[in-house]
């Protein structure tokens, strides 16, 4: 079977995050995002793709701050409530029954119940005709200890970070299952015959 190129999200599992922002007049905003990724290890920047008209983008532009919240698989209902097209004056925290999680380096709060919170500042925008790439710097990364080892490594079998696979007329929520394998980064730099 061959699929059209624009359906690449049918084959790429996407992380689902909630981005929380605050408007200049203090209105809380929370919106789900699937197009987000770290920019190369071990840098502290992330990039997210946005349509040109989003309240979240307007708030990031106006304040230079946002929080990337990592929801559990049990938060798909809240994610879908936040996905609705509300006018800018509607508080998605209230609509979805979300509790603010205090931030320490940025004004927008995170969202309680999440696995982790990345407090970010705007670094740069790369504008195209139909979308914008937003590069943010992670100023502070906080995690919920219940889902992490003492070394700060997530246990996906406990945390169950929310992901999605897109389909032709909808999306399927899922979470990483893992296959039990653990590999050292050093393996990537070794080859047969090396001393």
Image: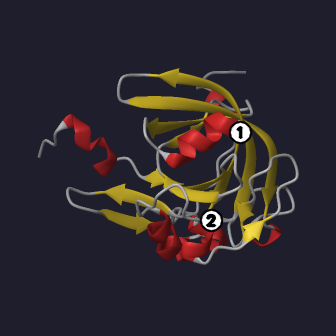
Please tell me how crowded label 1 is: few (under 14), some (14-19), or many (20+) other residues with Cα within 10 Å: some
For disc 2, the marked residue is: 156
Residue 7 makes an appearance in the image? yes
- At 69% from the left and 43% from the top, the residue drawn is 184
Please report whichever mark, 1 or 2, sits nearer to the chain's N-terminal start.
Answer: 1
Q: Position of residue 59 (x, y in %)?
A: 62, 43
- At 62% from the left and 69% from the top, the residue drawn is 93
Q: Position of residue 194 (x, y in %)?
A: 67, 21
Please tell me how crowded label 2 is: few (under 14), some (14-19), or many (20+) other residues with Cα within 10 Å: some
Residue 154 makes an appearance in the image? no
Image vertical order of residue 192 relative to residue 92, above or below = above
- At 69% from the left and 46% from the top, the residue drawn is 24
Image vertical order of residue 74 relative to residue 89, above or below = below
Which mark lies nearer to you, 1 or 2? 1
For disc 1, the marked residue is: 63
For residue 128, side relative to residue 4 (left or right): right
Q: Which mark is residue 95?
A: none
Q: Quadrant of residue 99?
A: bottom right
Q: How is the image coloured?
A: secondary structure
SS class of the residue under badge 1? helix
Q: Position of residue 121 (x, y in %)?
A: 74, 36
Image vertical order of residue 189 relative to residue 4, above or below = above
The total of numbered circles placed on residues is 2
Front residue of 136/27: it is: 27
Front residue of 16/148: it is: 16
Front residue of 80/16: it is: 80
SS class of the residue under badge 2? helix
Q: CA distance from mark 1 to mark 2?
A: 33 Å
- At 57% from the left and 25% from the top, the residue drawn is 125
Q: Position of residue 85 (x, y in %)?
A: 41, 59
Front residue of 118/184: it is: 118
């Amino acid at each position: 079977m061959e699929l059209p190129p624009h359906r690449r999200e049918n084959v790429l599992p996407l992380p689902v995050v909630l981005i929380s922002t605050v408007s200049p007049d203090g209105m809380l905003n929370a919106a789900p995002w699937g197009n987000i990724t770290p920019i190369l290890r071990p840098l502290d920047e992330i990039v997210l793709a946005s349509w040109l008209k989003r309240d979240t983008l307007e708030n990031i532009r106006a304040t230079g701050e946002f929080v990337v919240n990592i929801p559990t698989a049990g938060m798909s209902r809240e994610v879908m409530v936040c996905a609705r097209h509300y006018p800018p004056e509607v508080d998605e925290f209230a609509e979805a029954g979300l509790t603010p999680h205090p931030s320490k380096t940025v004004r927008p709060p995170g969202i309680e119940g999440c696995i982790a919170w990345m407090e970010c500042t705007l670094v740069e925008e790369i504008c195209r005709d139909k979308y914008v790439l937003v590069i943010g710097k992670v100023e502070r990364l906080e995690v919920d200890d219940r889902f992490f080892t003492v070394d700060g490594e997530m246990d996906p079998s406990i945390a169950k970070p929310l992901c999605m696979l897109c389909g032709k007329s909808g999306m399927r929520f899922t979470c990483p299952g893992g296959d039990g394998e653990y590999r050292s980064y050093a393996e990537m730099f070794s080859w047969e015959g090396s001393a």
